[in-house]
């Protein structure tokens, strides 16, 4: 239904900010010139929307983020969030999956969806004048999804194929999956997003129905719109299409906590591969902690780009690795892992690169970092942030991920936070979080290809039923 | 944001979205940009879009792997990789520090036809960035120790690539279809050829092929035509390549029938690449072929291949087909992955979709829907300066004028059903095709 604009504004919490990132350049920061004006709006049924106009092209990106991911899956039911995402393309009472895709395509749009630990998101990229169409479609599948057995069986096989491509036939992916599982003993981040194979096979339609009913609710959804549109008109359309969707007033997200155990773990994956791999995971706090910004700077100093310490030491100086880096997750619902990793060069062992990484961490703690190093890192992150603004879809990703983690304004406070980090902060967090006593180290030990495949040919009458995976 | 390794699982794989960069077609906001010829035989293309305080620069040179002797495969790539490893009196670390401080947005990559140097900088850093680009392109030092480092890096990554089934299948497919020509070789070279590349080869390659003649300079973003011209002239005027003979090894005869190439690996899935040599991008049939392929296997969930193999039978996560066509060569290929045991079935189903297209063509409604997508989505792609730069560079490389973006939708709209079917018959050649499969052969038991 249509409402007058004045009434709508009552619901609109105008939090528009002209971008005020101080960044490294202070008042001269180029970020001051990034056109960035986010409006937040809340519908009476609890659905939220973040609106960011960007009129460079006559296109609009529309995303619906559900605040549910593999994080919400119970033991034995892993892969549920992801397979439900697949099933969301199989049609509603209104229109079949085929009609749904066809409708988007013949209106010049593209669409897809993605699932992560913390969220499941659906997106369409459309010509600017088709915004209403995608809202109709997304509002429809928010409540009217049809979950049919004849769709579910092939879809399970599709997901098993996806798992084979991404993980089972990729030695490094398999290693990361196992490291993650070992590092988190209590938190659901231990489970792969795509799910364990046996769980995927055993999921039933009832599991999907329950999950859908519980989490696909307007009060659990956040729409993000970036592109060529007028915020007032977008708000009117949101009211019209999502306004009537009833809410069951879902409970907030369940809380999980990883134990603060100080245990060193080692995971070894032996698999046919050309080269070994090494990954070291450390529990580290995220954006809610005062240490978050220092950890992000530590990530940049150790592993951000060609001048980073790990690259310079392992790849350039010692030439024992083909690549080396660091990966820290600042924005997530619960704290994640701070990874250090390296791809050993031919003829080099994982243990060699492991020693070199440890030495670099020790050296950083002992000798500290320089102001110059931090300034270079900051300048680099600042430039990369502007570069990322070039892509409207990426803008929408930043907003959505931050909103799901707790606050979309994290996108704005990130750079000023980094600018405040001092060299001694970086050393302090390295000491606090990168020690071996709470580390999970993963090693891929390559097996030669000449070995026979683990599973005998399926036609052998007395072969084992399962190859032991 | 920190560069996080996003672990996202998508409803279908992104290759589909990336497949058609030049392909989408256009209407409302046509893309306007300036084109100017510069002294020395170079071309300048500028699209001013000042919304963000950044500039996207690309410099394209005719210095791809097509120029290298087949026995030294990898030479073009190695030359390109070494540019930033010492130039104009600066060593590798000094250059890396400068680049990192600019946001790490400078890079050089080699392809079969071209080398592309790209630079993404904040407007405030443009002078510094352009100077860096000119130094590495014009005055590289090629220090011997850096050559050895790059060589062992290249050999290492060639090894690492062997763990990727898709890479292995693509390699086998191209080698069979194109032999030792540039299309058949890997741009990175091979474990046999990379050790043979000497410093003199690299210096000569740079001397012969790096220069203004044939160069294309693209600027998109917070910049005017005037400023772009000044920058190019200031930094690149008088830059001359010596030129030379580019080798042209013979193209092997086309396969007779469906030639199977099998690579046995202990994998759970078979990766299948099926295809043939096909039309170039300048062939007038291209538009019909584009519409045809969109319907057959280029259009996401509702393509015939996806509908059959994925939606109905659950055989694959992804299957797609595409034309890879450029100015001088072209191929059509179909790619899928499926568990070893269903490889035969997936291949059969794919072939039957192709034959259906060739024998029965498409309906009027299918034609209209495909055209609606291709033309309707055209303008939506120009939403970032990076994508605009890629687009106008590819238009120039093909020898089309800046009005091409305006004509493209009309060319698509003019396609008829008959032309679509004809394109399938003429440009997909199952009797001159290669079928490359990487997987566990004992489980796959291929019939072909």
Image (tube, grey):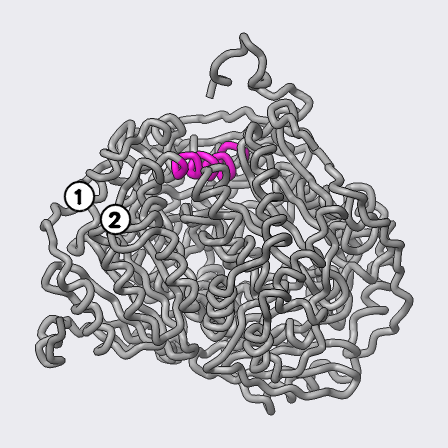
Q: Is residue B9 left or right of residue A51?
A: right
> Are there few (<14), some (14-19), or many (20+) residues within 10 Å of tag 2?
many
Q: Chain of mark 2?
A: A
| Residue identifier under label 1 | A214
**Residue placed most toward the observer, A59 or B62:** A59
Q: Is residue B214 left or right of residue A109?
A: right
Residues behind callouts 1 and 2 on a single chain: yes
Dot 1 or dot 2, earlier in sequence: 2
Disc 2 is placed on an element classified as loop
**Residue placed most toward the observer, B426 or A222:** B426
B249 in the magenta segment: no
Q: Is the residue B272 above or below the residue A55 in the image?
A: above
> Are there few (<14), some (14-19), or many (20+) residues within 10 Å of tag 1?
some
Q: Position of residue A233 (x, y in %)?
A: 23, 77
Q: Position of residue A393 (x, y in %)?
A: 40, 64
Q: Residue at x 84, y 69 (%)?
A: B207
Main SS class of the magenta portion in the image: helix
| Residue identifier under label 2 | A145
Q: Is residue A295 visible?
A: no
């Amino acid at each position: 239904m249509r409402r007058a604009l004045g009434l709508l504004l009552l619901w609109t919490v105008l939090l528009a900010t002209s971008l005020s990132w101080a960044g490294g350049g202070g008042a001269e920061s180029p970020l001051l010139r990034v056109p960035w004006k986010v409006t937040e709006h809340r519908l009476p049924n609890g659905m939220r929307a973040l609106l960011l106009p960007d009129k460079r092209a006559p296109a609009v990106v529309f995303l619906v983020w559900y605040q549910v991911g593999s994080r919400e899956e119970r033991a034995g039911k892993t892969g549920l969030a992801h397979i439900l995402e697949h099933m969301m393309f199989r049609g509603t009472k209104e229109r079949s999956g085929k009609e749904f895709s066809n409708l988007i395509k013949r209106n010049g749009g593209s669409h897809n969806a993605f699932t992560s630990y913390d969220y499941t998101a659906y997106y369409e990229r459309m010509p600017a004048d088709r915004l209403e169409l995608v809202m109709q479609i997304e509002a429809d599948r928010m409540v009217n999804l049809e979950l049919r057995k004849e769709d579910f069986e092939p879809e399970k096989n599709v997901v098993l194929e996806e798992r084979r491509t991404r993980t089972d036939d990729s030695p490094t992916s398999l290693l990361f999956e196992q490291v993650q599982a070992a590092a988190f003993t209590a938190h659901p981040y231990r489970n792969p997003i795509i799910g364990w194979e046996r769980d995927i096979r055993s999921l039933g339609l009832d599991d999907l129905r329950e999950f859908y009913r519980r989490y696909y609710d307007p009060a659990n959804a956040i729409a993000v719109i970036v592109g060529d549109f007028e915020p007032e008109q977008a708000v009117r359309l949101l009211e019209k299409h999502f306004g009537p969707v009833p809410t069951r007033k879902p409970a907030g997200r369940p809380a999980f906590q990883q134990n603060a155990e100080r245990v060193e773990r080692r995971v070894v994956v032996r698999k046919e591969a050309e080269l070994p791999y090494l990954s070291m995971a450390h529990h580290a706090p995220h954006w809610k902690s005062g240490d978050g910004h220092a950890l992000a700077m530590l990530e940049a100093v150790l592993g951000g780009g060609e001048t980073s310490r790990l690259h310079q030491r392992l790849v350039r100086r010692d030439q024992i690795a083909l690549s080396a880096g660091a990966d820290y997750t600042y924005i997530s619902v619960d704290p994640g892992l701070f990874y250090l990793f390296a791809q050993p060069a031919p003829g080099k062992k994982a243990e060699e690169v492991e020693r070199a990484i440890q030495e670099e961490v020790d050296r950083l703690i002992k000798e500290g970092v320089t102001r110059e190093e931090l300034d270079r890192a900051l300048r680099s992150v600042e430039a990369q942030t502007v570069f990322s603004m070039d892509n409207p879809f990426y803008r929408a990703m930043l907003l959505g991920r931050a909103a799901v983690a707790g606050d979309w304004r994290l996108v704005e406070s990130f750079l000023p936070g980094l600018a405040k980090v001092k060299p001694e902060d970086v050393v302090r967090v390295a000491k606090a979080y990168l020690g071996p006593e709470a580390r999970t180290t993963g090693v891929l030990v390559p097996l030669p290809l000449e070995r026979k495949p683990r599973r005998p040919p399926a036609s052998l009458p007395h072969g084992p039923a399962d190859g032991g995976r | 944001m920190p560069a996080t390794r996003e672990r996202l699982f998508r409803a279908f794989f992104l290759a589909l979205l990336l497949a058609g960069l030049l392909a989408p077609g256009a209407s409302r906001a046509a893309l306007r940009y300036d084109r100017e010829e510069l002294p020395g035989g170079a071309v300048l293309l500028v699209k001013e879009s000042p919304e963000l305080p950044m500039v996207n620069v690309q410099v394209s040179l005719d210095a791809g792997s097509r120029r290298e002797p087949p026995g030294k495969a990898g030479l073009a790539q190695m030359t390109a990789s070494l540019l930033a490893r010492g130039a104009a009196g600066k060593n590798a670390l000094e250059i890396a520090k400068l680049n990192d401080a600019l946001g790490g947005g400078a890079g050089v990559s080699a392809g079969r036809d071209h080398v592309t140097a790209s630079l993404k900088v904040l407007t405030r850093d443009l002078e510094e960035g352009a100077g860096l680009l000119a130094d590495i392109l014009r005055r590289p030092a090629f220090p011997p120790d850096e050559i050895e480092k790059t060589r062992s890096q290249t050999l290492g990554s060639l090894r690492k690539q062997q763990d990727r089934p898709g890479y292995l299948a693509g390699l086998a497919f191209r080698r069979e279809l194109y032999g030792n020509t540039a299309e058949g070789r890997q741009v990175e070279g091979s474990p046999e050829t990379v050790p043979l590349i000497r410093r003199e080869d690299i210096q000569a390659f740079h001397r012969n092929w790096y220069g203004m003649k044939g160069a294309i300079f693209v600027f998109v973003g917070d910049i005017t035509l005037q400023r772009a011209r000044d920058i190019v002239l200031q930094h690149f005027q008088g830059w001359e390549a010596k030129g030379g003979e580019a080798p042209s090894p013979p193209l092997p005869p086309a396969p007779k029938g469906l030639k199977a190439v099998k690579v046995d690996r202990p994998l759970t899935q078979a990766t299948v690449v099926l295809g043939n040599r096909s039309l170039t991008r300048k062939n007038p049939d291209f538009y019909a072929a584009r519409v045809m392929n969109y319907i057959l296997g280029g259009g996401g969930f509702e393509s015939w291949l996806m509908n059959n193999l994925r939606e109905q039978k659950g055989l694959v996560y992804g299957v797609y087909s595409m034309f890879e066509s450029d100015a001088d060569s072209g191929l059509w290929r179909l790619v899928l992955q499926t568990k070893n045991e269903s490889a035969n079935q997936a291949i059969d189903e794919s072939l039957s979709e192709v034959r259906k297209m060739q024998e029965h063509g498409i309906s009027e409604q299918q034609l209209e829907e495909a055209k609606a997508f291709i033309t309707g989505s055209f303008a939506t792609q120009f939403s970032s300066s990076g994508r605009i730069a890629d687009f106008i560079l590819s238009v120039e490389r093909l020898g089309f004028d800046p009005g091409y973006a305006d004509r493209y939708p009309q060319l698509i709209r003019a396609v008829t059903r008959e032309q679509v079917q004809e394109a399938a018959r003429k440009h997909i050649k199952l009797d001159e095709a290669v079928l490359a499969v990487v997987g566990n052969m004992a489980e796959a038991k291929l019939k072909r």
